[in-house]
Image (cartoon, rainbow, N blue to C red):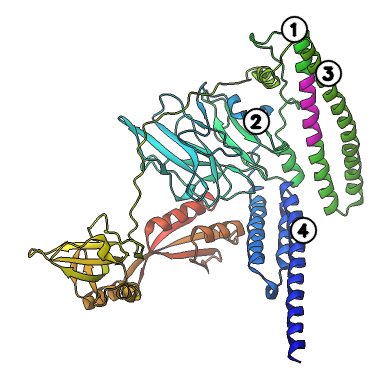
Amino acid sequence: MRRKTIIFHIFLCLFWAWSASGQSDKVLREASRADALRETYFFEESRDAYVAALEMFVDSLMTADDSLLRLDVSDRMLLSENGLNMMSYVSRPNVVARHKFSLDDFFLYYPLPDHGWRSVPCQLDSVAHRFSKAVYFRDGDREVYWSASDKDGIRNIYRSEYQDTVWSVPALLNEHMTSAADEIYPMLSPDGQRLYFSSKGLYGVGGYDIYVSEKDPVSGDWSVPVNMGFPYSSPADDFLYIDSPDGRYSVFASNRDCGKDSVFVYVLDYDDMPVRHSVEGPEELRDLARLDPSSGKDVSGSSSVSADIPENVDTRRYMQKMAEVRALRDSISVYGMRAEEARIRYSRTSDPKEMAAIEEALLSYEMAVPQMQDSLDRASARLQEIEMEFLFNGVVIDPDKLLAEADREMVGHSADFVFTRKSLGEPLALNMLEPEPAFDYSFKILEEGQFAEDQTLPEGLVYQIQMFSTYSKAGVSQLKGLSPVFETVAPNGKHTYRVGLFSGYNDVLANLNSVKRAGFRSAFIVAFNDGKEVTVAKAKALEAERKKVQTLYEVRIVTGQKELDMVVADGIRQQAAGKDIARSRTDDGGNVYVVGPFADKETAENLASFVRAMGISDASCHEITQK
């Protein structure tokens, strides 16, 4: 009987594992469908699909991997909700020109001074990134912003400034511009008052979105970054936004409608005060996000061959055939993307007329691709024949160099704009200060004990554990691995050693036995207030008194008759993790949301600034007294 019971339990466990695995596959399929909808701007349908995926989870069968998957799907659902919200604030910039470039050197075609880009790896950024291929630093600059990986492999934005003869220690900007994901390509506006960059971890719709932060004229600090919205940001990867030095253009790059190894560079008329509008639906937004230039044509690649490559009929024929091959490859990629978009639209509609129109469009895409593929095969074969002719005649051709020369100067739709290829600058050699490793003052037991680097006690109430006293100076070996250890010497020459910096009695009490077990059986608790020793009883009384009366802060958000937007609420929860969000009513029936409490004013002010940046103007910090 016992054997049958064991077999039954084994069977039941296997069944649960099989069921959970099958459920995870269903979740992944539904989440993938939601991803495809989001990437084609169907944010509402995408959100509903993510919700459906989340509802497939069976709590009783949840594993650790399932929990991570649920969290991942929830995060992706937030991207769709962000997209829905951002559809109400869409710009319609005038597109001057666009051109597709290789991901390896697209930045060299930006309208910026020559020799400003420095290739990665370099002194500032030691690890090359898929998109971030270079750092911008001009000779004579006295400050520099760049993106580099931290110890966890996350790319953050750093800043350094020139101070007399050396560059300052690299420093992060602030908590608003440091997310849990990558930030890349920080670029200052010509007047230095705005910083543009791209991030995967801030409020956005997926991939890298483009953000702008304003410099505070008083403090010099950077404000909460704001997503620049559609069509600058998209579900694809968008990055390296600049305003041209002459103030005429705005330029950025994106891999929307591109293969994995190329990007479009878009040139727009500069607009200091863009008017934001809402869009009626995904189709309008998707068409706008393509950023087709005014003439409806892409930039042509006409140019002359440079002097170091002989220009003749053969080289011109080779370059024309190479341009044809590239154009066909790009067209096949674009048609494939548009066919996929049509399939998704077809799956979400039930209108017979719309279905018929989509079927017709899809058929035209599917018929065009084989024809283009046949043309591509023939063009590629002809290209190889030309290369063999060069080889037979003893002519050595470097295709990459030839194409680079062909791309060196490409005229845009506006006669006033020209894509000109710049040259890389010399490798960087900056005399930059190295950050000194910060001493960790948290209580630890290590293989070898450590004396505190700064023996000064902080202001306020502090508890420590006194280990021992002796008339001879103690060595590291006598610390039994404890850290950080503080030493005081009395007028009579007696040395006293204490360990730790604890802000509360319960904290120091919880670690007392650890010190005793390390070998200091007579260890006991001592207390200091503003650097002066007080009895433990008095310290506990001070601690209790300070808990009774404390100045706290809260953020009040007035939305009038509207509910608090879900996207804003999620952003608040991220910015103020663990804080309550309470709702009350005004006399006229409006909504007031209160977030808090906060122990310090700066944190509350930062949250209020974030809410205002999200479009709710009536958000403010208020002082409250807790007893």
For label 1, the residue is 312
Element carrying mark 3: helix
Q: Residue furthest bottom?
A: 1
Amino acid type shown at disc 4: Arg
| Residue segment shown in magenta | 321-334
Q: CA distance from mark 2 to mark 1?
A: 32 Å
Instruction: Name the residue located 24 percent from the left edge and 76 percent from the top edge.
Output: 524
Horizontal arrangement in the rendering, residue 607 relative to residue 264 (left or right):
left
Residue at the disc numbered 2 = 266
Q: CA distance from mark 3 to mark 2?
A: 35 Å
Chief secondary structure of the magenta portion? helix
Q: Quadrant of residue 465?
A: bottom left
Q: Is residue 175 above or below residue 102?
A: below
Q: Nearer the viewer, mark 2 or mark 1?
A: 1
Using a 10 Å C-alpha cutoff, classify the residue at mark 2 as few (fewer than 14 neighbours), some (14 to 19) or many (20 or more): many
Q: SS at mark 1?
A: loop
Q: Which residue is located at x 35 percent, y 57 percent?
A: 440
Q: Secondary structure at mark 2?
A: strand
Q: Residues within 10 Å of mark 1 (few under 14, many from 20)?
A: few
Q: Nearer the viewer, residue 541 or 313?
A: 313
* Mark 4, residue position: 29
Q: Identify residue type, mark 1.
A: Asn
Would you name the residue on which mark 3 appears?
385
Q: Quadrant of residue 317?
A: top right
Query: Mark 4 or 3 closer to N-term?
Result: 4
Q: Earlier in the sequence, mark 2 or mark 4?
A: 4
Mark found first going from the N terminus, 2 or 1: 2
- Quadrant position of the N terminus in the picture: bottom right
